[in-house]
Image (cartoon, rainbow, N blue to C red):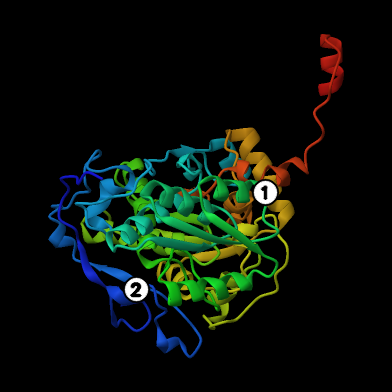
Amino acid sequence: MTALPLTTSAYAGVLRDGVTGVEVAEADAYLPSAPALGAGVHAYASPVYDLAAAGLDGALPAPGSGPGVFRFAPLLPVDPAGPLVSLGEGGTPLVPVPRAAEAAGLAEGALLVKDESRNPAWSYKDRLAAVAVTKAVQQGHDTVVDASTGNHGAATAAYAARAGLRCVVLTVASVPETMKTLMQSYGADVVAFDDPRDRWVVMRAGVEQRGWVPVSGYLSPPSGSNPFGVGGYKTIAYEVWEQLGGRVPDAVVAPVAYGDGIAGMVRGFRDLVALGLADRVPRMVAAEPFGPHEAALRDGFVPGAAVPAGPTVAFSIGSSMATWQAWDALRSTAGAAAPADDEAVMRAQATLAATEGLYLEASSVITYAVLPTLVARGAVRADETVVLLGTSTGLKDVGATAARLAPVPVIAPTLAAFDAATA
């Protein structure tokens, strides 16, 4: 790939453990850290930045400075000179949803959706994959690996294909066929397991014995994904700030399993504060099926603690355990967490699609499903500016939607038949 004339990187070349504050060498970036949490408990370190070294002069890089999210390469943990692996990700729209806002009890103009379904592989995971795969290429690796139920694996497979790397995806037998098809179509070596925990056993062996680069998490209790890739989510914060005219929202509601997205966005908003572009970080709010982060905020983070869980239409975020990085992102921003059941999620999907033209995956539209609870609790006020992170398209799992729709009627070619069928 051709090197691009970009600004010097702010990345300082080391990582810092989020719990202990101890610096971690880049060579150890893919290994679990945070021994302060206790034996058998894991948390990833995060890249350290010296924003002054990037020479940005209190401004974000201009549009066109690099491909896709690498417009912001000086603020990412990569060498801005390349090679950079991009499919044109990022730059997704921030869409006002006034009718959905009114239905949820918010003021007109108060609610917006950051529609990440517009990314090349149709989810926000593309941002993580672009940065993680770029880092793997720059480090000279030849294989990346995911344990994924779909979006993460599809994004990694797409960017690995773009980079010419081998991609291994370890998935679950029960995931929708659409997800498996996507991952296989991008050329990944895809295998499935009946027990989701078996994925991590094979993945850890591949990381430790074969040098595969982990793009997702692979440990239990869970910790988070590739520490460089998580930095790709910083770019959502930068874009939201720009799209709101140089201000930050009051709250960002995101689907949360292990918290990569909210951890990355918090780092991005903190960059904006450090650059003098924003005066605060918005409250981060976790939307989740079963409530492990709600419990962690209430009771304190307990490593390995689990809440009851089971099947859910929001299978991509169906975690029973909180992670340190997600809990820390919520706690440090005075945020909140709320659960929603399958019925509420599917009603939210139908409402947002039929009233605003946004068809989001169940694991994504859960952010809208939890809004009434957040308003009732006072976690979100009716007059506040709230951004929902729309992480993925509903086309990733049309079966869940179709199961709740009536069959399309076949009618005679008359208006009377039409009227009868649509009455």
Horizontal side of 345 relative to 36 (left or right) equals right
Q: What residue type is labelled 1?
A: Glu
Q: In which quarter of the image is residue 414?
A: top right
Query: Residue at 52% across / 43% down in the picture?
Result: 107
Q: x, y percentage for residue 415? A: 81, 10
In front here: 140 or 52?
140
In the figure, 361 relative to 408: above or below? below
User: Which numbered circle lies on residue 29?
Assistant: 2
Horizontal side of 186 relative to 22 (left or right) equals right
Q: x, y percentage for residue 18? A: 36, 77
Question: Circle 1 is placed at which residue position?
Answer: 177
Give neighbour class at mark 2: few <14, some 14-19, many 20+ (Cα, 10 Å).
some
Horizontal side of 98 relative to 244 (left or right) equals right
Q: What residue type is labelled 2?
A: Ala
Secondary element under disc 2, as helix, strand or loop, is loop
In front here: 265 or 188?
188
Image quarter where the C terminus lies is top right
Horizontal side of 76 relative to 170 (left or right) equals left
Q: Is residue 288 visible to us here?
A: no
- Label 2 to label 1: alpha-carbon separation: 33 Å
Image quarter where the N terminus lies is top left
Q: x, y percentage for residue 370? A: 61, 55
| Count of marks overlaid on the render | 2
Is there CB contact under 8 Å for labels 2 and 1? no
Query: Residue at 70% across / 67% down in the picture?
Result: 194
Secondary element under disc 1, as helix, strand or loop, is helix
In the figure, 224 relative to 249: above or below? below
Q: x, y percentage for residue 411? A: 85, 18
